[in-house]
Image (cartoon, helix red, strand yellow):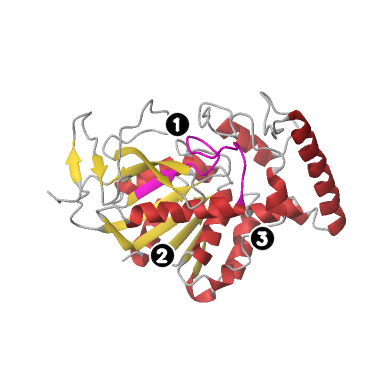
């Protein structure tokens, strides 16, 4: 048995408590398991906690392959997203599958959401949420059984853009995958399909949001952007219906998910408007795989990101017939074979 890593199974079959090289390197049982996807009993999983450089404690689920051996360091992957989701939803599904395929995989709740900390709640920050990826890399880099030179990240939906931002600043990230990616700066500043891309439109948006900020200060609590009610109008856009069909039905509903419940604080958009997150995408020096659905309303985000990345190590993979949310949960659509081969090739 590795002297640094102690494997014990006192709680339940298949559970591992992991104590690593630092005091907080501990894996504990998931309490009140509320994952919305089909759980694979062959993949070991537990809760871990780590702190980002802003002092915010993040909570994640660490998935371990069945043949995990602390004495044989292997490749690992950090995962987060979609924007407004929690680790019990999409990122956990991806992490479980990648662990089944042999990777150590860490799905986490970003700052201010889910079980993670942050005194404010339901707030998005391009800076802090990018840092969350690097904090997870910190955690894995010190974990016995992980090769710190073979760590990649996977960002889903809005966390795809933050993943690219992290890859542009954190040279420890050796490979990046985005799936059904959003650029949250672009959609916040310009609207969908850049329909609001003008100084006048942004000025009106900023005036509205700052009026909400004043009202929040007067009230003492922030107003939230409720994404969906209990029903949708018949003329709702198809992509909104697709979101509703995931977040508001048993397929994907989770009480800690912002998209299933009360949404982000409305003023979160202000910082996203003013913070371009793909400004240095062209300086990423490690391989990037962009995965998107052929019929996704958001496909243009990945296509633009692809155009910004260095040609020598970029790849755009379009999934035939898939829409945006198909890549949240449809095992017949998510191209795990492609993702696995990309990660194996670039995390050797």
Up/down of 59 relative to 313, above or below: above
At x 66%, y 23%, the residue is: 230
Cα distance between the residues tagged 2 and 3:
22 Å
Rendered location of residue 323, percent (x, y) = 58, 46
Rendered location of residue 278, percent (x, y) = 61, 63
Q: Is residue 308 visible?
A: yes
Rendered location of residue 41, percent (x, y) = 28, 34
At x 40%, y 59%, the residue is: 152
Mark sitting on residue 146? none
Tell me the residue that label 2 is attached to: 172
Q: Which comes before the other along the chain, label 1 or label 2?
A: 1
Task: Find out whether the residues at labels 3 and 1 contact each other: C-beta distance under 8 Å.
Answer: no
Q: Which comes before the other along the chain, label 3 or label 1?
A: 1
Q: Quadrant of residue 348?
A: bottom left
Q: Is residue 292 visible?
A: no
At x 69%, y 56%, the residue is: 186
At x 76%, y 56%, the residue is: 194
Q: Secondary structure at mark 2?
A: loop
Question: Number of marks in the image?
Answer: 3
Q: Along the horizontal axis of the image, is 75 left or right of 242?
A: left
Q: Nearer the viewer, residue 146 or 186?
A: 146
Tell me the residue that label 1 is attached to: 36
Query: Mark 3 Cα within 10 Å, few/some/many (few <14, many 20+)?
Result: some
Q: Which comes before the other along the chain, label 2 or label 3?
A: 2
Up/down of 186 relative to 37, above or below: below
Query: Mark 1 Cα within 10 Å, few/some/many (few <14, many 20+)?
Result: some
Up/down of 20 relative to 287, above or below: above
Q: Secondary structure at mark 1?
A: loop
| Residue segment shown in magenta | 105-125
Rendered location of residue 88, percent (x, y) = 45, 35
Tell me the residue that label 3 is attached to: 276
């Amino acid at each position: 048995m590795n002297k640094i890593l102690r494997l014990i199974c006192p709680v339940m079959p298949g559970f591992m408590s992991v104590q690593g090289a630092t005091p907080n390197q501990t894996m504990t049982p998931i309490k009140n398991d509320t994952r919305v996807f089909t759980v694979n009993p062959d993949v070991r999983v537990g809760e871990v906690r780590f702190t980002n450089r802003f002092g915010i404690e993040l909570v994640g689920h660490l998935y371990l392959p069945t043949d995990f051996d602390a004495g044989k360091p292997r490749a690992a992957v950090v995962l987060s997203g979609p924007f407004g989701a929690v680790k019990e939803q999409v990122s956990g599904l991806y992490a479980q599958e990648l662990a089944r395929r042999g990777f150590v995989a860490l799905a986490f709740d970003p700052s201010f959401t889910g079980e993670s900390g942050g005194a404010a709640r339901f707030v998005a920050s391009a800076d802090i949420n990018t840092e969350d990826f690097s904090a997870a890399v910190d955690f894995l880099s010190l974990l016995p059984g992980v090769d710190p030179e073979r760590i990649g990240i996977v960002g889903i939906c809005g966390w795809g853009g933050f993943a690219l931002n992290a890859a542009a600043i954190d040279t420890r990230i050796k490979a990046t995958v985005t799936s059904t990616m959003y650029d949250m700066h672009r959609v916040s500043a310009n609207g969908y399909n850049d329909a609001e891309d003008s100084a006048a439109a942004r000025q009106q948006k900023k005036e509205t949001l700052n009026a909400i900020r004043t009202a929040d200060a007067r009230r003492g609590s922030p107003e939230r952007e409720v994404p969906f009610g209990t029903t949708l109008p018949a003329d709702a856009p198809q992509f909104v219906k697709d979101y509703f069909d995931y977040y508001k039905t048993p397929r994907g509903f989770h009480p800690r998910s912002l998209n299933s419940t009360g949404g982000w604080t409305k003023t979160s958009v202000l910082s996203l408007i003013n913070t371009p997150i793909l400004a240095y995408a062209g300086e990423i020096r490690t391989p990037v795989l962009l995965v998107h659905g052929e019929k996704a309303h958001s496909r243009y985000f990945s296509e633009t990101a692809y155009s910004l990345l260095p040609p020598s190590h970029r790849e755009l993979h379009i999934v035939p017939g898939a829409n945006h949310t198909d890549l949240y949960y449809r095992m017949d659509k998510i191209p795990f074979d492609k993702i696995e081969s990309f990660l194996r090739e670039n995390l050797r």
